[in-house]
Image (tube, grey):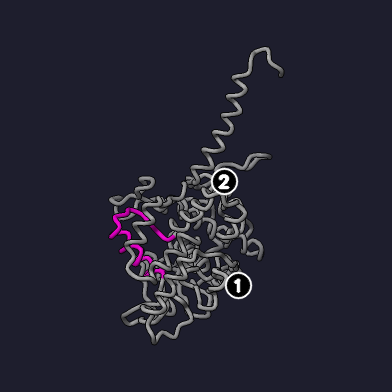
Amino acid sequence: MIRESFRLLGGFGWILAAVPGEEAVMAGVFTPCLISSVGEPPRLGDPLVDEYLRFTAARVRPNSLVAQSFDLKVFFTVVAKPPQQVDVADVLVFIEEQRRPRRGGNVVRLADGEAGLAASTIKRRLATISSFYDYLVLRGLCERNPVPRSTNARRRGHRGSPLVRAPKKMPRVLLPEEVVALMSALRTDRDRAMVSLMVHAGLRRCEVLGLRFGDVHIGDRRVFIADGKGGHQRLVPVVPTFFTQLAGYLEAERPGDAEEEYVFVVFKGATRGRPLTAAGLDQVLAGARRRAGLRHATCHELRHTCFTRLREAGMALEAIQAQAGHASIETTRIYLHLSNDWLAGEYQQAMAILDNWHDEPAGGTP
């Protein structure tokens, strides 16, 4: 039985290790032990995997590197083979294991009723594994990638069926009255300022927490996102209400001994004056959600709500793309479908044309 242990190392690094059972130790298989510390790429203990992680560290953001490291750790824990001995059958066994019910099958997701991992999670892990083997093929260390592109051979003009089919679900958004209830349930100007950045400007959670004083342009009523997703930077407008809330937070709430350049810091406890963490912001939202009687209101749902309302108000997709920091306009198109007014307007316009066709006399001009 595989047992996982997680231990913080002074708040700066972490170890995530898989401890195998006796049968695995006796077999002498590769046992991944994910180790990371500040300033160094993660390591799993296999030369090829560690080489790939060093290569990847220069190409992706820190969060992506951590996710890929964990994905590889999970894969090689399940497969229990050296990288060069993995074949297609091992990958298919891994997929089956990921779909196996967790916690005895007693817990299921409300979204789809499944007890295993979400299809999106499995697809992400397969993408990580495939990228790793693409690297080995490029290096000439493997003849082929063991991760199949589809379940059947590709033919000309036919892409085949995906290994894992993830349903495309519409993002959840908050109703206007739910936004009002959530804002009313927040207890401090700091919390209201953070939520305003997400629900009125569409910032991501990490972008809110990473905001520095030099990034706040009060005169222009904008904030500069210095470290957005994919390393992209952007300058976005923000509602005047945010700056009022920010002023209240700085004047009456922010600890006077806080020397951090980050705007949003912890109020009390051992980490007083230190930058607020993602877990801290999630805790703030959870409390406000509970007091407001809302069943959902995550950071990303606030971001979706912002862009949905902007689209409903007539903001162009290109402008929403710039505000959101999307690399591709295709990502932004989801807000066309979330915006009820847009779809209804397009439908009514088309039906008006069809009605005119039907109303024309039979002998009319073609």
Give the structural element (helix, strand or loop) at label 2.
loop
Q: Which mark is residue 253?
A: none
User: Height in image: 96 above or below 41?
Assistant: above
- Let me know if residue 79 appears in the view: no
Residue at 66% from the left image edge and 63% from the top image edge: 138
Q: Amino acid at mark 2?
A: Ser
**Residue 352: horizontal and vertical position, in percent?**
58, 29
Using the image as rendered, state which of residue 252 and residue 45 is in the foreground: 252
In the depicted view, which residue is nearer to us: 99 or 331?
A: 331
- Quadrant for residue 182, please give it: bottom left
Extent of the magenta region: 278-299
Q: Position of residue 16 (x, y in %)?
A: 41, 71
Q: Note whether 358 is above or below 130 in the view shown.
A: above
As drawn, the residue found furthest toward the top would be: 363
Magenta highlight on residue 286: yes
**Looking at the image, is mark 1 or mark 2 earlier in the sequence?**
1
Q: CA distance from mark 1 to mark 2?
A: 30 Å
Q: Label 1 belongs to which residue? A: 58
- Which quadrant is home to the C terminus? top right
Q: Position of residue 50 (x, y in %)?
A: 54, 72
Q: Classify 311 as above or below 300.
A: above
**Is 189 a magenta residue?**
no
Report which quarter residue 254 is drawn in.
bottom left
